[in-house]
Image (cartoon, rainbow, N blue to C red):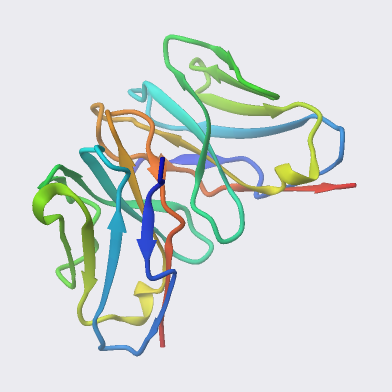
């Protein structure tokens, strides 16, 4: 089946650095993408989303970039903080609106002081 | 506003026993989803309710899993009989529309 994948299982950065987490998706029909953050013992928490008619969207300290040509999604975190340490998942809603999210395997971000 | 809640937070049972997980969505959210994450793997979809109706149950692994949402409010997911491979974290999510899904903290199920 089609799935959303992540390039790296782990990423370690220093506090204050910018972090980039990548994701490759395979379903060209996907039109909605979401980044989730999951801290230990908690459920996935929405960070930012983007629709396929956009190629960039900015939030507070986070930016999501979408490259439909190569089916690539990335999450940029500016001035990474220790509190950003978590597992990050990208997800797509590749079928009709309202159906299941398809998740990637996740990238564990570790931020050291 | 209260978020999605799930009960219990942890459950340890023996193979062959029955377990029932509960999810209370955010009030007013018609869409309710069940997902699970088996150790080391990605989060995978199980099924989707719209109010009390099953919209999509294509992710349910087999007939040992039964989900209900009587009255269109809370939902239960029963595993009977549980097998070792059912161990994992079961997440519930709700959505007021067909976009952003709000996740609960999950139930960690361990089958011994």
Q: Residue at x 31, y 81 (%)?
A: B83
Q: Residue at x 66, y 22 (%)?
A: A60
Q: Residue at x 14, y 42 (%)?
A: B51
Please say whether residue A108 is visible from this viewpoint.
Answer: no
Of the pair B101 and B63, the residue shown nearer to us: B101
Q: Is residue B63 left or right of residue A10?
A: left
Please say whether residue B100 is visible from this viewpoint.
Answer: yes
Q: As displayed, is residue B102 above or below residue A47?
A: below
Q: Residue at x 35, y 73 (%)?
A: B86
Which quarter of the figure has residue B8?
A: bottom left
Residue A70 lies, in percent from the top left, at 53, 20
Q: Is residue B86 left or right of residue A24?
A: left
Which quarter of the figure has residue A89?
A: top right
Q: Is residue A61 left or right of residue B69?
A: right
Instruction: Say how many tags the image has.
Output: 0
Q: Quadrant of the C terminus of chain B?
A: bottom left
Of the pair A85 and B84, the residue shown nearer to us: A85
Of the pair A80 and A74, the residue shown nearer to us: A80
Q: Quadrant of the N terminus of chain B?
A: top left
Residue A2 lies, in percent from the top left, at 36, 40
Q: Of all residues shown, which one is farthest toward the front?
A: B1
Residue A103 lies, in percent from the top left, at 44, 43
């Amino acid at each position: 089946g089609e799935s959303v994948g992540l390039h790296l299982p782990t990423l370690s950065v220093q506090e204050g650095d910018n972090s980039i987490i990548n994701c490759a998706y395979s379903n060209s029909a996907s039109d909605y993408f979401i980044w989730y953050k999951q801290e230990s013992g908690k459920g996935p928490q929405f960070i930012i989303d983007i629709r396929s008619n956009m190629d960039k969207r900015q939030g507070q300290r986070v930016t999501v970039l979408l490259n439909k040509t190569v089916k690539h999604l990335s999450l940029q975190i500016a001035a990474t903080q220790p509190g950003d340490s978590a597992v990050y998942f990208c997800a797509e809603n590749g079928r009709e609106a309202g159906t299941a999210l398809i998740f990637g395997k996740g990238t564990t971000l570790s931020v050291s002081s | 506003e209260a978020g999605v809640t799930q009960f219990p937070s942890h459950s340890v049972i023996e193979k062959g026993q029955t377990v029932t997980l509960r999810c209370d969505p955010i009030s007013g959210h018609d869409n309710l989803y069940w997902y699970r994450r088996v150790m080391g793997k990605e989060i995978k979809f199980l099924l989707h309710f719209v109010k009390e109706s099953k919209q999509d149950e294509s992710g349910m692994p087999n007939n040992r899993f039964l989900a209900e949402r009587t009255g269109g409010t809370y939902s239960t997911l029963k595993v009977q009989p549980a097998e070792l491979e059912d161990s994992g974290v079961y997440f519930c999510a709700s959505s007021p529309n067909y976009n952003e899904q709000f996740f609960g903290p999950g139930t960690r199920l361990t089958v011994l």
